[in-house]
Image (spheres, rainbow, N blue to C red):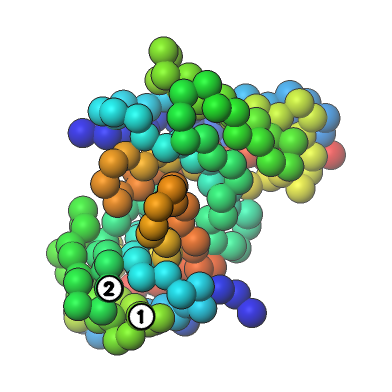
Amino acid sequence: DADVTQTPRNRITKTGKRIMLECSQTKGHDRMYWYRQDPGLGLQLIYYSFDVKDINKGEISDGYSVSRQAQAKFSLSLESAIPNQTALYFCATSDVGQGNTGELFFGEGSRLTVL
Amino acid sequence: GNSVTQMEGPVTLSEEAFLTINCTYTATGYPSLFWYVQYPGEGLQLLLKATKADDKGSNKGFEATYRKETTSFHLEKGSVQVSDSAVYFCALKGGGFKTIFGAGTRLFVKA
């Protein structure tokens, strides 16, 4: 099984619908992230969380919200989806600690299409 | 602020050709540098990394050297295979938590 699991892997929805993307990890990492990938733009950070009680906005948080239900679970919600939120979404984790270089561990991605 | 610029793709090569994907960065201090690879239908995974100047990261035949004087971290491979077809991302992580990614370079390798 993958260390970082995202569900659903693919979702097609309509404008105005509420969508939740879920992420769970078995790596025991405290830090979790949600990124959005658009062609030619690389990855942009939406939200990040350093622990259950610490959630922070990233570069492109407008239109998104998150919930850190447990150390292992971090969900991304689109309260009212719009077509320009069509993208590939990635959850990632990282470790902290002495000497750690901050390598990110990614899930396989959730492809969202908003019609 | 910190930034990463990498060559635009797509890059199309024949099998066994030499690969270079250029990456330059802007950062204060001494960031760690990474190359991530994304195979079709998969998430990103770390390919190699370097944490200080003149370090060479290597993995699966790929290499990149951290060049502080030219602020570069170019990815190279001597002989590419069809299985190397993927999108490659250069990235840096400075003193804080945030990882900055380049736009990605798609590589196609033809048999």
Quarter-of-image position of residue B49: top right
- Can you see residue A47? yes
Look at the numbered disc 2 and give the secondary structure of its residue: strand
Total label count? 2
- Pick the quarter of the image with the C terminus of chain A: bottom left
**Residue B38's spot in the image, x, y percent?**
57, 52
Q: Which residue is mark 1?
A: A71
- Can you see residue A111? no
Residue B19 is tagged as: none
Query: What amino acid type should be assigned to the residue bearing mark 2?
Result: Asp
User: How far separated are the C-alphas under marks 2 and 1?
Assistant: 7 Å
Q: Which residue is mark 2?
A: A51
Q: Residue at x 44, y 51 (%)?
A: A100
Look at the numbered disc 1 and give the secondary structure of its residue: loop
Q: Residue at x 78, y 43 (%)?
A: B82
Q: Chain of mark 1?
A: A
